[in-house]
Image (spheres, coloured by chain):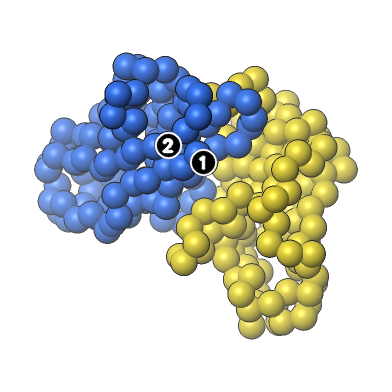
Amino acid sequence: DAGVIQSPRHEVTEMGQEVTLRCKPISGHNSLFWYRQTMMRGLELLIYFNNNVPIDDSGMPEDRFSAKMPNASFSTLKIQPSEPRDSAVYFCASSLRQSSTDTQYFGPGTRLTVL
Amino acid sequence: GNSVTQMEGPVTLSEEAFLTINCTYTATGYPSLFWYVQYPGEGLQLLLKATKADDKGSNKGFEATYRKETTSFHLEKGSVQVSDSAVYFCALGLNRDDKIIFGKGTRLHILP
């Protein structure tokens, strides 16, 4: 079975540009999570969806960040405009929500560099 | 609030040494506890979990026991290998929502 798929794997862009990160969760999973990982701040939960509905976006740093999940098999995280401090590895994870004991399955991540 | 505290790294050991990575938690209610591992260049993957007090999770020679009295979930392995070099994350999950709260991670280096 395919795991969580993220694209692109690497993105280099210039400050002020729009960046779109994409995620395809594991088929049949109904919860999807976006995380950001940096050396300074560690792993941060940005937003998560259940059945395509955003449940908690309190981790989204500011209005420049937005996330959508138009259907059960696709989600995007958009940064507009991007800034150098957004440079990080962004992970998408999915799970089959039955309880909090459910395992989250992580994608390989997108390494974003904003110059 | 709910939180996880784990020992800071990096931890450097020789191959075949005994490993302990300490983890303590603060939570309301009765959380589930996890250890995730991140190998270089990859996403996190579940290593083991325990869902109630006194449960022991185990996988790939790693073990951790859910200790409610000390609010701890320490990770142990009797004989580490070079291939165990990675970052290890302790985490907790609360039954009322989907979120998992991760610790800051402990980087482990195993020398041959």
Please state which amino acid type lies under the numbered disc 1.
Gly
In terms of depth relative to the viewer, which is nearer, B76 or A73?
B76
Task: Name the foreground residue: A58 vs B79.
Answer: A58
The quarter of the image holding the C terminus of chain A is bottom right
Pinpoint the chain carrying mark 2.
B
Dots 1 and 2: beta carbons under 8 Å? yes
**Left or right: where B32 falls relative to A51:** left
Q: Which mark is residue B26?
A: 2
Chain ID, mark 1: B
Amino acid type shown at disc 2: Thr
State how far apart marks 1 and 2 are (Cα): 7 Å
Q: Residues within 10 Å of mark 2 (few under 14, many from 20)?
A: some
Q: Residues within 10 Å of mark 1 (few under 14, many from 20)?
A: few
- Give the residue displayed 70% in from the left and 56% down from the top: A60
Horizontal relation, residue A113 to residue B3: left or right: right
Chain B: drawing colour: blue
Say which element carries label 2: strand
Instruction: Find residue B55 and report its horizontal and vertical position in percent.
Output: 35, 17
Q: Colour of chain A?
A: yellow
Which numbered marker is on residue B29? none
* Image height of A96 relative to B99, above or below: above
Q: What x and y, as percent, mark residue B93?
A: 52, 31
Q: Which mark is residue B1?
A: 1
Q: Is residue B66 visible?
A: yes
